Image (spheres, helix red, strand yellow):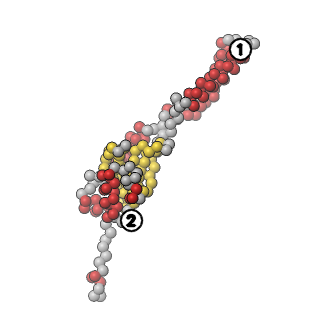
């Protein structure tokens, strides 16, 4: 057919080819994995949270034990019941004040959460500009690619984010940062 040569089908680019063409090397997966593990250890659960059941049982058992000890020390006479009740009440108030004021923090551990983000929100999410610029460049050259923001979460606080770019079956890490300080990024 005479017009077959006019319709050339271009092969879609892969993420690896696009990175090579721009001379970019993504953050190595072992660097990301080591960083994620170190951050989970750094922001792990508190002693009180890890031993929550034992601490709760200790506090439940300790209140009557304090009352019995106070009664045994002062004898189980007619006047000891007010002292026993008073000391148990004082113990429970002390525990309530300690836990209520946050002196004993039951801080839960942190966990990693990944979510898809549109390229238009890169600047609004606090992603460093050098990482965001690379993400925009690669995203524009690879239609159908998605940006994934990974965040280390503790309760509702974001502690340590990273950015991935996924295209087809390939996925690369574009950067890791904390409080605006870049830990690793594409080079």
Q: Where is residue 41 in the image (x, y as percent from the top left)?
A: 42, 38
C-alpha gap between disc 1 and disc 2: 78 Å
The answer to whether residue 1 is seen in the rendering is: yes
Label annotation for residue 66: none
The answer to whether residue 14 is seen in the rendering is: no
| SS at circle 2 | loop
Which quadrant of the structure image shows residue 141? Answer: bottom left
At x 44% / y 52%, what residue is drawn? 114
At x 56% / y 34%, what residue is drawn? 52
Q: Where is residue 42 in the image (x, y as percent from the top left)?
A: 41, 37
Question: In the orientation shown, which residue stands out farthest toward the right?
Answer: 78
| SS at circle 1 | helix
Q: Give the labeled residue for mark 2.
A: 144
At x 65% / y 12%, what residue is drawn? 73
Residue 109 in the figure: left or right of residue 182: right
Which quadrant of the structure image shows residue 133? Answer: bottom left
Q: Position of residue 94 (x, y in %)?
A: 59, 24
Which quadrant of the structure image shows residue 121? Answer: bottom left
Considering only vertical position in the picture, is 30 above or below 99?
below
Q: Which of 70 and 61 is in front in this view?
A: 70
At x 49% / y 44%, what residue is drawn? 156
Q: Nearer the viewer, residue 24 or 178?
A: 178
Residue 130 in the figure: left or right of residue 121: left
First reached walking from the N terminus: tag 1 or tag 2? 1
Q: Give the labeled residue for mark 1.
A: 80
Residue 166 in the figure: left or right of residue 52: left
Question: In the orientation shown, which residue stands out farthest toward the bottom?
Answer: 1
Q: Position of residue 163 (x, y in %)?
A: 37, 52
């Amino acid at each position: 057919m005479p017009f077959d040569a006019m319709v050339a089908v271009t092969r879609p680019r892969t993420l690896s080819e696009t990175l090579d063409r721009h001379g970019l090397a993504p953050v190595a997966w072992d660097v990301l994995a080591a960083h994620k593990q170190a951050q989970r250890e750094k922001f792990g659960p508190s002693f009180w949270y890890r031993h929550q059941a034992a601490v709760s049982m200790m506090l439940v058992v300790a209140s009557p034990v304090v009352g019995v000890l106070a009664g045994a020390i002062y004898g189980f006479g007619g006047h000891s019941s007010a002292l026993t009740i008073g000391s148990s009440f004082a113990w429970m108030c002390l525990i309530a004040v300690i836990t209520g004021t946050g002196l004993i923090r039951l801080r839960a551990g942190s966990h990693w959460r990944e979510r898809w983000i549109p390229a238009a929100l890169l600047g609004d999410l606090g992603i460093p500009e050098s990482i965001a610029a690379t993400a925009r460049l690669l995203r524009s050259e690879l239609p159908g690619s998605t940006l994934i923001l990974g965040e280390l979460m503790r309760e509702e606080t974001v502690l340590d984010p990273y950015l991935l770019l996924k295209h087809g079956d390939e996925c690369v890490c574009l950067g890791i940062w904390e409080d605006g300080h870049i830990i690793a990024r594409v080079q």
